[in-house]
Amino acid sequence: MASQREIQRTYDFMDRVIRLSLGESPDITCALYDGDDSLTLEQAQRAKHAYVLEALRLRPGMRLLDIGSGWGPMLRAARDAGVNAVGITLSPRQAAACRRQGLEADVRDWKGLSPGDLGAVDAVASIGAFEHFCSPEELMSGEQDAIYRRFFGLCRRLLPAGGRLYLQTMVWGRNAVPYEALTLNAPKDSDEYLLALLEKLYPGSWLPEGADQIVRDAEGFRLVSANSGRRDYIATMKEWGRRNMRRRALRNPALLLRLSARYAVSRNFRYQVECLARACNRTCFEREIMDHQRMVFEAL
């Protein structure tokens, strides 16, 4: 799994740029357009939050655990609906951003979490975090399924019978490339090169094979529903591109100086910037190298 250091390296350097562009509670996961191109990004993100709350059958006074809560958009939506929510993240800056909004968030690794640590919960959500749970090294050593079973085992211990888990994650698509083929020496428009750049942006992370693997490893749960959000993610990323996060960063002299200094000394950071500038994630969805799943499970 991506370590806390790797998560900090990935998300902490994005922190100010993303908050400048998308507000203090930015949502950098797939929105829900559901075929309605007239929706703004904000409306589509609110539609997603409403979808999650309804899928989890959450009502005022109930308690939600958000595993991988980021900057707190789901926590905020839950609070606005009268739901008590707590989040965990590996990024100290994300947790601090949540707390500034009056949200409950802790810097914790789910792998070290016990059912009694955060109190009883009625539902669990994990949006955009599952894709970081298995590293390439763990993949190559055959540990991927065991890691996912461990996650579902924790969720099953946290939830009462009939309690629900909402899982939203990227997965590999029909044109996936094997890990061994990834290289920065490949042609720059090749799938292999784009994925090698993504590995620099998200170190320590490897996606699930697909929905079938996730269902297979979801011991103690039954699948309630699943659908692909690939087209929605493309629409979401296009809207992020229109917001032009880089331009907003250039308007902040202190931030620009900090990023420029890092760009000058870090090859990895230059690869990360290239990955964002080339919209590698979006291209991988467009080429169907990646897919996306919204999945609802119920504890048996």
Image (tube, helix red, strand yellow):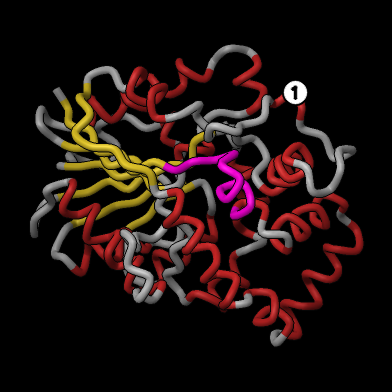
Image position of 237 (left or right of 178)? left
Which residue is nearer to you in this view: 269 or 29?
A: 29
Which quadrant of the figure contains the N terminus? top right
Q: Does the magenta stretch include residue 230?
A: no
For residue 42, above or below residue 194? below
Image position of 21 (left or right of 159)? right
Image position of 273 (left or right of 204)? right
Q: Does the magenta stretch include residue 289?
A: yes
Q: How many labels does the image show?
A: 1
Which range is magenta?
282-292
Q: Which corner quadrant of the image does residue 164 belong to?
A: top left
Q: Percent from the top left, x then y, of residue 281? A: 61, 51
Residue under the point 32% across and 25% down? 152
Residue under the point 19% across and 57% down? 84
> How crowded is the residue under tag 1: few (<14 C-alpha within 10 Å), some, or many (20+)?
few
For residue 68, above or below residue 71? above
Residue under the point 83% across and 63% down? 262
Q: Percent from the top left, x then y, of residue 255? A: 72, 77
User: Which residue is farthest top?
Assistant: 142
Asked which secondary structure carries label 1, the reply is helix
Q: Percent from the top left, x then y, of residue 35? A: 33, 61
Which residue is nearer to you in this view: 153 or 117?
A: 153
- On the image, numbered disc 1 is attached to which residue? 180
Q: Percent from the top left, x then y, of residue 166? A: 28, 42
